[in-house]
Amino acid sequence: MVRAGAAVAYGAYEREEAEARDARRGVWSSRFDRPQDWRAAHPHPHARPQAERGSSAPASATPAPAPPLPPARPAP
C-alpha cells in the first residue's frame, strides 16, 4: 500500500514511501498533508490533549448495563 501511494509510512517502509513520492503515485500525485500535520492544523474543538485522555473512551462514557439474565429453570 505504501509503495502504491495509498498509505503513509509510520516508522517503517520509508524507502517504499520515497519511491511512491518520487513516482508521484497515489496521495503523492498532488498536494498532500500528512494526517498528523492536518490534525495539528485543525484541532477538534472539544478534544483534550493526548496526555489528559488516558484511554480512547470519552470521559463521559459509562459502560452499558448488562442485559438481564434469563429466568432460572427449575431443577430436575
Image (cartoon, rainbow, N blue to C red):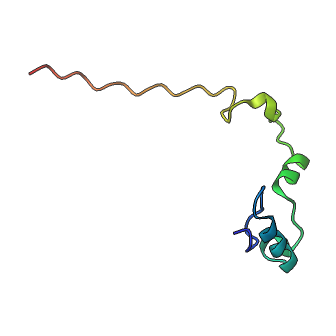
Q: Residue at x 51, y 28 (%)?
A: 64
Q: Residue at x 87, y 77 (%)?
A: 22
Q: Say above or below: 35 vs 63.
A: below
Specify the farthest residue to the left: 76
Taking 17 as reference, is 74 left or right? left
Query: Is 19 in front, or is 8?
Result: 19
Q: Residue at x 77, y 62 (%)?
A: 8
Query: Is 2 in front, or is 33?
Result: 2
Q: Say above or below: 60 vs 40.
A: above
Q: How many marks?
A: 0
Taking 62 as reference, is 1 left or right? right
Query: Is 54 in front, or is 14?
Result: 14
Q: Say above or below: 43 vs 19.
A: above
Query: Is 22 in front, or is 58?
Result: 22
- The C terminus lies in quadrant: top left
Q: Position of residue 43 (x, y in %)?
A: 86, 43
Q: Which of the 4 image quadrants contains residue 71?
A: top left
Q: Position of residue 75 (x, y in %)?
A: 12, 19
Q: Position of residue 18 (x, y in %)?
A: 84, 71
Taking 35 as reference, is 72 left or right? left
Q: Position of residue 36 (x, y in %)?
A: 84, 51
Q: Say above or below: 11 vs 14.
A: above
Specify the farthest residue to the bottom: 23
- The N terminus lies in quadrant: bottom right
